[in-house]
Image: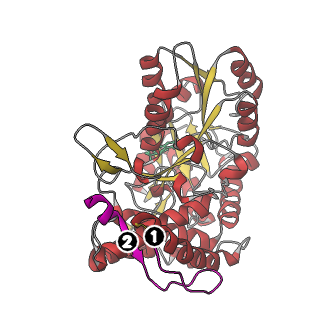
Amino acid sequence: MVIQVTSLIAVHWAIPNSTGKSGRVRVVPLYNCMSICLLNLGQRQVEGMSSQRNQMVNVARIREDFPILKRVLRGNRRLVYLDNAATTQKPISVIEAISEYYMNYNSNIHRGVHQLAEEATIKYELTREKVKKFINAKSNDEIIFTRNATEAINIVAHSWGVRNISENDCILITEIEHHSNIVPWQILAEERGCKLEYVVVNENGELDLDDYRERMDRNRVKIVSVSHMSNVLGTIVPINKIVKMAHERGIHVLVDGAQSVPHMEVNVQQMDCDFMAFSAHKMLGPTGVGVLYVKRDILTGMPPFLAGGDMIKEVDKYYTNYNELPYKFEAGTPNIADVVGFGASIDYLNRISMPAVRNHELEMIQYAMQAIQDVQGITIYGPTQSSVRGGVIAFNLADIHPHDLATIMDDRGIAIRSGHHCAQVLMRKLQVSATSRVSFYIYNTKEEIDSFVQALNDARRLFRV
Ligand code: C6P
């Protein structure tokens, strides 16, 4: 049959494995053969890059790698980019990796046997290997490429949720969630006729663990879905405790890692979460790529989310045999160039090391919290201790509307975010319609924070508050 001919390939590339011996000639499915090669390639490259663990970040050196940071804005202002929770800037290595794909080996993946197709497939699958190592998943099969964190959460709600949630069950989320971790569950709850409950956030911006326990005990909870780090309050939630509490009751846990994976070391095996979602564009990578991590034994029981090319093994007139994991969940031609670019962003972060990224952000947050708490009329939302905070500060300045404040900042070249931050449930809890927000990353400096504080004081004078 044609399907057997095209899906089997003789592996005779002499790629050395970790013991230094050449790979043997075997006949295996094309996809498997790719991952055998990639395992070897990926391991060597990533190990070499993580040798500088725990070093401090050399910000001046890092800034050189980001062309956009040299930009001069309207009014001859130097760019001060403090909107990193929305999306981060991209180093030249990421930009070049994407353009190199289009210049040198643009091709579809997993299909052709020509050289370009082979090179593109290897690069695409190499990023999967890098993601696996970055979050310490057990297997490449557990890494599904999506468009973004939002799509990843939707896959779980629609594929796993529809199979596993019935009437009178309960979906447990929290008051700090982003809309991406609320709306898919609202839709599922309506479809399945089940309950949707919210764990409350306390005055210090932390989740109430007693409330968590009570709701888990009171309801037939099937899934807990929670943001590892709030995009508004900056709160880093006690995720290990939450997962343990849920698992003791046989409840699955989805971790929204959109704000945590880019900023700290995340280890899915140690955390023991069942699902995790995050986006490449918040960790120096391109837009249009996200990741869904799912434990393998859960993924095997999930039906496909999208159907079509590449997610199939064999299609007959009235039935289809689905492809192996993870391809079963990647229907159609994926965003190949940006997945390749994502690989370069992981390399970049590995070279710095995630503990160093976190250390730098802690330094930024401590400096900024200290500096802005003295500004008259300021209200800061979220935890007071920086140890449980990521690099995000949401605030209001007297009764100045956040959009007005953001405009004043913009006049000075300072990019901050204002609005509800896609967290309207939380805004209602805070009894505001909007806040301003600054968020930091590896290239931000104390001088930039000084400029921001200076602009806050300018705004106070301008609005006479
Ligand atoms: N938050 C912010 O400015 P996407 O858009 O799919 O890449 O990420 C969605 C998302 C999910 N969860 C959390 C905690 C998030 O912060 C985000 C994105 C951005 O805060 C854009 S609204």
Element at label 1: helix
Say which amino acid is labelled 2: Ile
Q: Which residue is mark 2?
A: 9
Q: Quadrant of the C terminus?
A: top right
In the image, residue 457 sits, relative to residue 199, either above or below, namely: below
* Image coloring type: secondary structure
Q: In the picture provided, is 261 more to the left or to the right than 7?
A: right
The residue shown at (65%, 57%) is 264
Residue 10 forms part of the magenta stretch: yes
| Residue 405 seen in render | no
Of the pair 442 and 272, the residue shown nearer to us: 272
Q: Cβ(mark 1) to ligand 1 < 8 Å?
A: no
Label 2, ligand 1: CB separation under 8 Å: no
Estimate the spatial distance between the alpha carbons at disc 1 and disc 2, rounded to whole Å.
Answer: 8 Å
Q: Are marks 1 and 2 in contact (CB under 8 Å)?
A: yes
> Looking at the rendering, which quadrant does residue 131 occupy?
bottom right
Above or below, comparing residue 106 to residue 324 in the picture = below
The answer to which image quadrant residue 110 occupies is: bottom left
Q: Position of residue 362 (x, y in %)?
A: 70, 57
| Residue 378 coordinates in the image, percent (x, y) | 62, 39
The residue nearer to you, when weighing 456 against 191, is 191
Which residue was labeled with disc 1? 33
Number of marks in picture: 2
Q: Quadrant of the N terminus?
A: bottom left
Choose between 372 and 34: the one closer to the eye: 34
Q: Amino acid at mark 1?
A: Cys
